[in-house]
Image: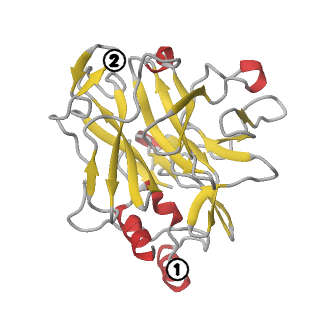
């Protein structure tokens, strides 16, 4: 098991948040880089492995909405989530076809890849999650299903927070499964909160708080509720009693409780987008996020404009 966790860390997959390194190694990295003692900052890219998943123009899928075959992963394969299932590393990745010009103007579906060592992957030839003639069609077509975030309960149920994109509005939505292939779609996460006040607001990128239990990363409760961070332009927080219906935390004036916001002149000057599941440690809750650098005077000149870095 330790060997598998070490391999997962080296790949840089989203599952890397569950990997623990020795105190001495971790402390040395922090001293050299100037990170605080709670930071996990020793991620490495293995030689001659990346990319582990690339676009494939040959795989086709019969789309139930176009009623035609489509090369569903021919243009892009990106924004993955990773977990463990049946002793293997499983990656769900966003794949775009060539149905439009530019990101967001094509259709996204989620592919399934698995690995024995966390480095070398096999893939299914058809997507396991996609827009269909179901209750979510209006919210997922024609843009698709994007940016999965995966976490597991102690009894083995997987909860996926993903983005529904109909090319009009992005909505954070929930789906559940026990095998990562047969899914139940539950719709937008904020439909019932505050009498539907936020059900049509822009929302995406959720990070459910987790903990380590007997070597497994599982969804945690705090004060009897599930918690998640979410957001792209700033980091918000929401709670739930059932993992399906979520209620954003608000300020006294009724605005989102923004925990992290872009910082002028820093690597995250444009966006602070929640990443993999947050995890409870002995020093507090650790959240990894995407920081996007702004261009011009707003950004950090040490990094390329519009580049993404992990925060």
* Residue sitting at x 52%, y 86%: 24
> Dot 1, crowdedness within 10 Å: few (<14), some or many (≥20)?
few
Give the mark toward the camera: 1 or 2: 2
**Relative vertical location of residue 266 with respect to residue 197 in this rendering, above or below:** below
Q: Is residue 36 left or right of residue 113?
A: right
Frontmost residue, 311 versus 191: 191
Frontmost residue, 303 versus 288: 288
Q: In terms of secondary structure, where does tag 1 sit?
A: helix
Q: Is residue 267 left or right of residue 256?
A: left
* Coordinates of residue 10 in the picture (x, y in percent): 36, 67
> Dot 2, crowdedness within 10 Å: few (<14), some or many (≥20)?
few
Frontmost residue, 144 versus 259: 144
Residue 36 appears in view: yes
* Coordinates of residue 70 in the picture (x, y in percent): 23, 23
Q: Where does label 2 land, which residue?
A: 64
Hey, which residue is sitting farthest bottom in the picture? 24
* Residue sitting at x 77%, y 35%: 250
- Display colour scheme: secondary structure
**Relative vertical location of residue 62 with respect to residue 163 in this rendering, above or below:** above
Label at residue 63 = none
* Residue sitting at x 35%, y 15%: 65
**Relative vertical location of residue 170 with respect to residue 32 in this rendering, above or below:** above
Q: In terms of secondary structure, where does tag 2 sit?
A: loop
* Residue sitting at x 56%, y 30%: 173
Of labels 1 and 2, earlier in sequence is 1
Q: Quadrant of the N terminus?
A: bottom left
Measure the alpha-carbon separation of dots 1 and 2: 55 Å
Snapshot quadrant of residue 47? bottom left
* Coordinates of residue 96 in the picture (x, y in percent): 30, 31
Q: Where does label 1 land, which residue?
A: 31
Snapshot quadrant of residue 249? top right
């Amino acid at each position: 098991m330790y060997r598998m966790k070490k391999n997962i860390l080296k790949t840089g997959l989203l599952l890397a948040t569950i990997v623990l390194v020795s105190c001495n190694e971790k402390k040395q990295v922090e001293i050299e880089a100037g990170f605080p003692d709670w930071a996990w900052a020793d991620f490495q890219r293995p030689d001659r492995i990346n990319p582990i998943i690339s676009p494939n123009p040959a795989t086709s899928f019969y789309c139930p909405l176009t009623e035609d075959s489509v090369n569903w992963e021919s243009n892009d394969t990106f924004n993955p989530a990773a977990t463990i299932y049946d002793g293997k590393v499983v990656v769900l990745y966003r794949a775009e076809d060539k149905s439009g010009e530019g990101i967001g103007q094509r259709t996204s579906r989620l592919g399934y890849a698995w690995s024995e060592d966390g480095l070398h992957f096999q893939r299914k030839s058809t997507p396991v999650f996609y827009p269909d003639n179901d209750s979510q069609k209006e919210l997922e077509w024609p843009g698709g299903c994007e940016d999965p975030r995966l976490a597991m309960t102690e009894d083995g149920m997987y909860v996926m927070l993903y983005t529904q994109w109909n090319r009009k509005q992005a909505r954070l939505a929930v789906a559940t499964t026990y095998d990562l292939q047969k899914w139940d779609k539950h719709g937008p996460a904020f439909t019932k909160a505050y009498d539907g006040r936020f059900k049509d607001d822009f929302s995406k990128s959720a990070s459910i708080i987790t903990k380590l239990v007997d070597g497994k990363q599982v969804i945690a409760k705090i004060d009897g509720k599930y918690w998640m961070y979410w957001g792209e332009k700033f980091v918000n927080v929401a709670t739930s009693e059932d993992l399906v219906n979520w209620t954003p935390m608000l300020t006294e004036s009724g605005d989102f409780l923004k925990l992290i916001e872009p910082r002028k002149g820093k690597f995250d000057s444009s966006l602070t987008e929640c990443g993999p599941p947050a995890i409870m440690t002995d020093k507090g809750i650790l959240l990894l996020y995407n920081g996007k650098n702004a261009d011009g005077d707003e950004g950090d000149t040490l990094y390329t404009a519009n580049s993404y870095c992990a925060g």
